[in-house]
Amino acid sequence: MKQEQEKGLIQLIVIFILAIIILSLLGVSIKSLIDKLPANNTLGDNFSYVWNSIKTFFNQYISQSYLIFRDWIISLIKNIF
């Protein structure tokens, strides 16, 4: 069951990347749709915009929880050994 979930996550990531590539090949820029600004390098702009959005989301919402969880795991491992 877990292996099927991992395959589903990988498939979702691949589909997401392919969707960005297809939109770029069609001349659609995600950034220009959001910001209403034209782009010269559509594929690069799309990946850049999505990556910056992911980083911003991670930094604002997930990083603190991740750091707490990571520190907890490290302390757990240190206590075991």
Image (tube, helix red, strand yellow):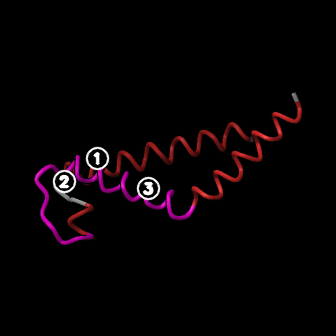
Measured along the vertical axis of the image, is residue 64 above or below residue 21?
below
Identify which residue is drawn at 48% across, 61% down: 57
Q: Nearer the viewer, residue 42 or 1?
A: 42
Give the labeled residue for mark 3: 54
**Which residue corresponds to mark 2?**
26
Query: In the image, which is nearer the foreground, mark 2 or mark 3?
Result: 3
Q: Amino acid at mark 1?
A: Ile
Q: Position of residue 43 (x, y in %)?
A: 22, 47
Q: Is residue 79 above or below residue 68?
A: above
Q: How many residues crowd around disc 3 within 10 Å: few (fewer than 14), some, or many (20 or more)?
A: few
- The magenta stretch is 34-61
Of label 1 and label 3, which has the lower sequence position? 1
Q: Pick whichever, 1 or 66, lies toward us.
A: 66
Identify the mark nearer the N-term, 2 or 3. Answer: 2
Image quadrant assignment for residue 3: top right
Give the foreground label among 1 and 3.
Answer: 3
| Residue count near mark 1 (Cα–Cα under 10 Å), binned few <14, some 14–19, many ≥20 | some
Which residue is denoted by mark 1 in the rendering? 21
Question: At label 2, which amino acid type do we have?
Answer: Leu
Task: Answer whether residue 59 is magenta in the image.
Answer: yes
Q: Is residue 7 magenta?
A: no
